[in-house]
Amino acid sequence: MVRFYNPKDEADLARVEAILSKGGIEYFLGEAKAGAAREIEVAEEDVPKAEELMLQDKTGK
C-alpha cells in the first residue's frame, strides 16, 4: 500500500472514500495525525485508476 491522498477534513475523507468505493478501488485508512483526517492508502497498482477517478470527479464527468 502507498499513500494516495491526505484529506483536509472528514468531509474530504468521505468524498474520496465514496469515489474510490464507487470505482471498485480497495483502500486503507492510515492513522490520524493530531486531529487531522486519516490518510488514504491504495495498492500501488491501483494508483493510476484512483487518480483517473479523482480527475473525473473534479471535472464533473
Image: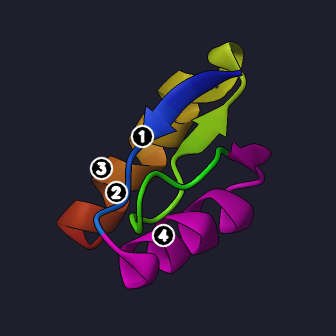
- Secondary structure of the residue carrying numbered label 3: helix
Disc with the residue nearer the chain's start (4 vs 2): 4
Answer few, some or many: residues within 10 Å of disc 2's Cα (few below 14, many 20 plus, some between 14 and 19): few
Quadrant of the image occupied by residue 11: bottom left
Residue 52 is tagged as: 1
Tell me how the rendering is colored: rainbow
What is the spatial separation of the Cα atoms under label 1 and label 4, in whole angstroms?
17 Å
Name the spot of residue 54 as percent of width and height, x first: 38, 52
As drawn, is 54 to the left or to the right of 1?
left
Contact flag, marks 3 and 2 (Cβ < 8 Å): yes
Name the spot of residue 9 as percent of width and height, x first: 35, 74
What residue is disc 3 on?
55
Q: Is residue 32 magenta?
A: no
Answer few, some or many: residues within 10 Å of disc 3's Cα (few below 14, many 20 plus, some between 14 and 19): few
Contact flag, marks 1 and 2 (Cβ < 8 Å): yes
Q: Nearer the viewer, residue 16 or 6?
A: 6
What residue is disc 4 on?
13
Q: Residue at x 72, y 64 (%)?
A: 21
Residue 5 is tagged as: none
Disc with the residue nearer the chain's start (4 vs 3): 4
Q: Nearer the viewer, residue 29 or 20?
A: 29
Question: Which residue occupies the extreme top position in the image?
Answer: 45
Magenta stretch: helix, strand or loop mostly:
helix
- Secondary structure of the residue carrying numbered label 1: helix
**Amino acid bearing label 1:** Glu
What residue is disc 2 on?
56
